Image (cartoon, rainbow, N blue to C red):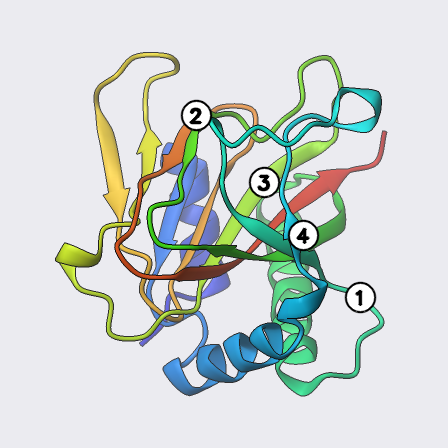
């Protein structure tokens, strides 16, 4: 049984991060993946930085992305966005986070691609508060790699937790607090990655 929004809120309050297997059912994650892959020609190489600082740097990240339109009527995307809106309401009620908006994109990592250790919050630019990653690949094995490594104590190399990118699993963590990286995988790795932000 997937964790309730209250359980996610409790984990965030206690430690600042939560891992939720079954946030979407495997069939729901498969439908979301199919919708994303049907748009694969519209994906583009992801970069780092924003605005005039934005650049594509293969030595830092190698994923390809496509932003979701919040007005979409595609059924699997609509289900996901509605589920995240409900989570936003629940977290605001439980934790008084003031989450105001949600931005999200499909992310596909070709075999061997990675994303070096980083923070999701941009330095000197408040806004992103909670990072959310939903995995879409079914039947992921340890040998496939591609784990999300979440560093638990700032810039220290340890301790960390590795999260298997298994279909339907949702990871949430405080954007300004936790550095993380995507380890290389031996097969294509797909997710929907997003951020709840506060009004600035």
Mark 2 is surrounded, within 10 Å at the Cα level, by few (under 14), some (14 to 19) or many (20 or more) other residues, namely many
Tell me if label 4 and label 3 are in contact, CB under 8 Å. Answer: no
CA–CA distance between discs 2 and 4?
24 Å
Residue designated by label 1 = 70
CA–CA distance between discs 1 and 3?
18 Å
Residue designated by label 2 = 179
* Res 129 → quadrant: top right
Mark 3 is surrounded, within 10 Å at the Cα level, by few (under 14), some (14 to 19) or many (20 or more) other residues, namely many
Question: Foreground: 33 or 46?
Answer: 46
Tell me if label 2 and label 4 are in contact, CB under 8 Å. Answer: no
Assign a secondary structure to mark 1: loop
- The answer to whether residue 31 is above or below residue 113 is below
Residue designated by label 3 = 130
Relative image position of residue 194 (x, y in whole percent) = 61, 50
Residue designated by label 4 = 44
For marks 4 and 3, give the one nearer the viewer.
4
Question: Foreground: 85 or 30?
Answer: 30
Assign a secondary structure to mark 3: strand
CA–CA distance between discs 3 and 2?
13 Å
Relative image position of residue 196 (x, y in whole percent) = 67, 45
Mark 4 is surrounded, within 10 Å at the Cα level, by few (under 14), some (14 to 19) or many (20 or more) other residues, namely some
Q: Residue at x 85, y 29 (%)?
A: 200
- Determine whether, in the image, residue 66 is placed left or right of residue 156: right
- Determine whether, in the image, residue 183 is placed left or right of residue 42: left
Query: Of the residues under marks 3 and 2, which one precedes in the sequence?
Result: 3
For residue 21, the mark is none
CA–CA distance between discs 1 and 2?
27 Å
Assign a secondary structure to mark 4: strand
The quadrant of the image that shows the N terminus is bottom left
Query: Of the residues under marks 2 and 4, which one precedes in the sequence?
Result: 4
Query: Of the residues under marks 1 and 3, which one precedes in the sequence?
Result: 1
């Amino acid at each position: 049984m997937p964790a309730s929004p209250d359980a996610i809120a409790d984990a965030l309050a206690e430690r600042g991060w939560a891992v939720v297997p079954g946030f979407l059912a495997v069939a729901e994650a498969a439908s979301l993946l199919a919708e994303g892959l049907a748009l694969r020609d519209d994906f583009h190489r992801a970069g780092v930085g924003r605005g005039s600082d934005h650049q594509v740097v293969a030595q830092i990240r190698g994923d390809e992305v496509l932003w979701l339109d919040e007005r979409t009527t595609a059924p699997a995307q609509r289900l996901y966005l509605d589920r995240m809106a409900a989570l936003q309401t629940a977290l605001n009620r439980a934790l008084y986070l003031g989450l105001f908006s949600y931005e999200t994109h499909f992310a596909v990592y070709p075999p061997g691609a990675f994303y070096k250790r980083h923070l999701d919050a941009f330095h000197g630019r408040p806004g992103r508060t909670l990072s959310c990653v939903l995995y879409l690949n079914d039947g992921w094995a340890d040998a496939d790699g591609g784990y999300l490594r979440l560093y638990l104590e700032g810039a220290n190399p340890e301790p960390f937790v590795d999260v298997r990118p298994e279909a339907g699993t949702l990871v949430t963590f405080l954007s300004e607090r936790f550095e993380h990286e995507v380890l290389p995988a031996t097969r294509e790795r797909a997710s929907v990655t997003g951020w709840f932000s506060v009004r600035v």
